[in-house]
Amino acid sequence: MNETAEIAANKHKDYTGAKIGMWLFLFTELFLFFGPFLLYSIFRYRYSTDFINAGSELSLFVGSINTVVLLTSSLSVALSISALQKGNKKLTLLLLGVTIVLGAVFLVNKYFEWDAKIVHGLYPGAEALLSRPKGEILFFGLYFFMTGLHALHVIAGMSVLAVITFFVMRDKVTQSDYVKIENGGLYWHLVDVIWIYLFPLFYLIR
């Protein structure tokens, strides 16, 4: 490699615009959840007893397991970024794979949890739910909508990380060019943060 090419390869890349753009995108994602969170707060105030009764029918154990799973996945994606910055490609790929698998575990747990509620008729529009107090109907409506919206974000995050994993394998994301994995990690952390708010609202309500 001649001197000019070497200088070009090692030239500092300014990713400020990409990072600012990612933060702006994350803020718009937070605003997407603002409306449902506001509705939850209003209905929780108006139908406090109903919300407590409905919340007691959710599995605190499953909710806690999913919380641990997502927190662990946030750690693994953060470690993957650190590994890439240190030039450890194999460890980066391993940690990204672990993160994606943990995301899948979260979704599987959520599927079985939703299925249990559907079997018992506790889903929007079900006759069994419509016969209950209004507050409980609203609670389960918000539960399915907000956790469903969050699950879509988990799927989106897993897809982003899968693409980044491919880029790392093909050396399109490297030790000196890692903004994509950083931004992907930020999106995954957003998924985690949203769940941290959903968990107490639905599972710890007493």
Image (cartoon, grey):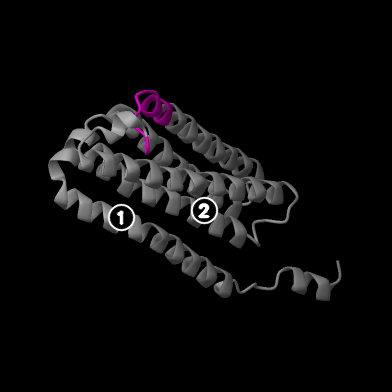
- For image coordinates 38% across by 57% down, the residue present is 33
Q: Residue furthest right?
A: 2
Mark 1 closeness class: few <14, some 14–19, many ≥20 residues within 10 Å = some
- Tell me which corner region of the image, top left, top right, bottom left or bottom right, holds residue 140: top left
Task: Tell me which segment is drawn in magenta.
Answer: 113-125
Q: Which residue is nearer to you in this view: 148 or 194?
A: 148
**Camera sees residue 205:** no
Q: Residue tagged by mark 1?
A: 37
Quarter in which the C terminus is drawn? top left
Left or right: 164 with respect to 143?
right
The spot of residue 157 in percent (x, y) is: 54, 48
Residue in view at x 67 percent, y 56 percent: 174
Q: Where does label 2 land, which residue?
A: 185
> Is 121 inside the magenta-drawn segment?
yes
How would you rate the neighbour count of disc 2 (Cα within 10 Å): few for under 14, some for 14-19, many for 20 or more? many
Front residue of 183 and 199: 199
Q: Amino acid at mark 1?
A: Phe
SS of the residue at dot 2?
helix
Amino acid tagged 2: Gly
Residue placed farthest to the left in the image? Answer: 49
In the figure, is residue 110 to the left or right of 158?
A: left
Instruction: Determine if the magenta segment contains residue 192.
Output: no
Tell me if 138 is positioned left or right of 17 in this view: left
Res 86 label: none
Total of numbered circles in the picture? 2
